[in-house]
Every structure is written in structure tokens, then in C-alpha cells.
Amino acid sequence: MCPIKQTGSRTSMGRIKVSHNYHDVSRGSSYDRETVCVEDHLCLLAECGEAQHQSSMAPLSRLRFASFLLTLATPSLTKGVAPGQIKNFVTFGDSYTDVSNYPAADGGYAWPTYAAGYGPFNLYPFAKDGATCSNNLTYRPSPPIFGYQLPNYFDEVKNGTISVDPEETVYTIWIGTNDLGANALLTGSDSPDVSIVPVRQCAVDVVKVLYASGARNFIMQNIIPLDLTILYSANSYPNRYWDEVRNTTEWNVFMRELSRSGNAITDMMLEALVPTLPDAHIASFDSFGLISDIYYNPQNYLNGTAPLNVTGCVDSCIYAINSSETGPSDCTIAEGTDRDSFLWYDELHPSEQTDRIIAREITAVMKGEVSPWATWLS
């Protein structure tokens, strides 16, 4: 069953008119499918799920070549957004981006809240704690982008809650931490045939679906180096996210491979996508590179009153094995300005100081300024 079925036709003014028909995504479906008709004679089938494993999907080895051929046939256009152009941004993702609660997952205000203030921009947040891209790929009992966040966004557009000019609006997508992690790809998804390939295709499909609805400006934030988090460190300990026996070295190595290969796959898919979306402006934001730079050069980013710390966290709780119901036995919590000395807030989430840095760089991108961590692909 399709979570979002969209059909559209071109209006007399040349804009794309898209109607939406929503259905809840059931856990048992083989895949989520979004049929997006952007012109009467052209229908783009955006699939996000197991079907992307099948032979109908072009092998990744062909993506760069296809992108190259399409680029030759596409005239050169101005890349990126102009200074002063962007007034709004809409966010999709997981707890890294969720602003619906205070404190957020970083122990304070999440990066979109800071970016809205730094701009200033109008923020329209749809990211939700615990989310994956699609629950039919990597199931979690949380609101995924497909099946929840996108339908909510389209509902609010339809009822007039959101009314923004596409030329003045950026759509950010930051998803993958939960898809790759414990109780998902790392330990075995509920769907055993699912791999990193359809999981990252799903993230790219978010751009396709939003583009078909009229969106034109996008920032795709890639996966952070999850192997540097405490949860996936070789020196990890039983914690609030995983208190069972595990081989921490194996987790660390596997997560290093998943995050790096996931980002490489996403880059290739975006390169192939760009020539197919006329007038779109897509930026690839290197969250992986930024977090890595903070990890290896904390003196350039962290400014708290405690010694700089990239291997510990603000809120650290050590559990006994299999003690999730009885709670932690040893917690250490940094207070006040000491918190700004940490890269991580807890065993999985960046700190509020790290989020301020992310917000600063994302703000620069949305303002049409140069950021060393962003590349406009179109």
C-alpha cells in the first residue's frame, strides 16, 4: 500500500500541480511506493524498500556513467541559492533534528532552533525522535519519513497551515542513524533482505517526492561517523541504548563500514539524480566531515570550561549487563558551561555545542554563503 500516492499535471503557467492521496504504511508491506507524475507524459516511480534490490534497479556501478551522460546533455545552470533568497526551511529526519521537545536529544536546543535564529528563517519542523526513512525497510516504533513525516507535511500544505514560496524555502533531510544502528542494519533488520543500498535510496527518494510537489531547494545531510560515537566505539560500555553482551570491536568496525559506504552510495545516487530535476538546487552537506573534524580538532570548536572531551559525553550512564529495567548504576553528568567542552551529549547524540556548530554551517549554506562542509551539486 502506498503511503503517498501523487498524481499531477502541468498547469497553464508551467508549474507542477500535484494532488495527494495518503494511506498509512503497514509494517507488513513489501515496500513503500510513491508514484509521482510530474508531467502528463512522464511518471517517476520512486520506490523505497525491498523492491529496490531487484533487477529493475540500475546497478550502482552505472550511476556515475548515467550521471555523466545526462550532464553532457544538460545546460550549465547557476548552482546553489542566492544570498537573501531563503526565508524558510522545512526539516525531515530523526532525533538529531527533532525540535518538538525541550530539552532536545542534545540536552538543550537542537540545531534547527539555532539555525532559525541565526538566519533568521521560519522553521517548519517534521523530524521525529527515533525515526528511520521507512519502517518497511528498518522498522522502529517511531514516525518514519515515509508513512508519517511526509504525509504530515503534505496535509499541512493542503489545509493551509504551511504556505511558503518554493523559491524561498530549503528542505533539509538528515536520516540514517537509526537505519544503520542497533536493532536495524547493524544487528539485523526485521526485513532480512534489506541492505544499505535501499536504505540510502529511500533518503534520496525524499528529494524526488518533494520535488514533484513543487520543492526546489534541498540540503541532504550525510551520515555522521557513527563509529566515533560512544555507543559504537570499540571501548563502549553497557548504556541506555544497548545493555546486552556484544562484541564492541565488531560493532565499531561494522559501523565504520556502514557509515562510509552509505555516504558513498548516497553521493553516487545524488549525482545521478541531479540532471533529472530541472531548476532544482541540491546541496550535499558533509556531516561526516564536520563531526570528524570536531573529533580530531576539538580546540577549533569546543569552548567549555572543562577539559575538551570527544570520547566521553555530557550525560554518561553505565549500566550493568541486561539491567535496562533496573536502570544505570553509575552516571556522570556535566553541568553549566562544562557541557560545551563535549562533542557528544550522550552515547549517541551530538552535544548542544556541536549542534550550534552544525546550525552555523547550515545557516551559511541557506544564506548562499560558502561553507567548507557543503557542496552545491546543482
Image: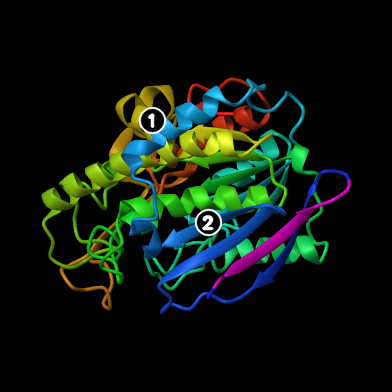
How far across and down, in percent of the image, does residue 305 sit?
41, 32
Magenta region: 2-12
Question: Dot 1 surroundings within 10 Å: few (below 14), some, or many (20 or more)?
Answer: some
How many numbered callouts? 2
User: Which residue has dot 1 on it?
Assistant: 289
Q: Is residue 3 magenta?
A: yes
Element on which disc 2 rests: strand
User: How far apart are the two marked residues, 2 and 1, measured between alpha carbons?
Assistant: 29 Å
- The residue furthest front is 41
Q: Which mark is residue 46?
A: 2
Q: Which mark is residue 65?
A: none
For the residue pair 352 and 92, the one nearer the viewer reads as 92
How far across and down, in percent of the image, does residue 377 sit?
54, 28
Of marks 2 and 1, the one in the foreground:
2
Element on which disc 1 rests: helix
How far across and down, in percent of the image, does residue 22 sit?
65, 72
- Left or right of residue 20: residue 330: left
Q: As shown in the figure, which amino acid type bears the numbered disc 1?
A: Gly
For the residue pair 249 and 175, the one nearer the viewer reads as 175
- Left or right of residue 168: residue 146: left
Q: As shown in the figure, which amino acid type bears the numbered disc 2?
A: Ala
Residue shown at the point (28%, 78%) measured from the top left: 325
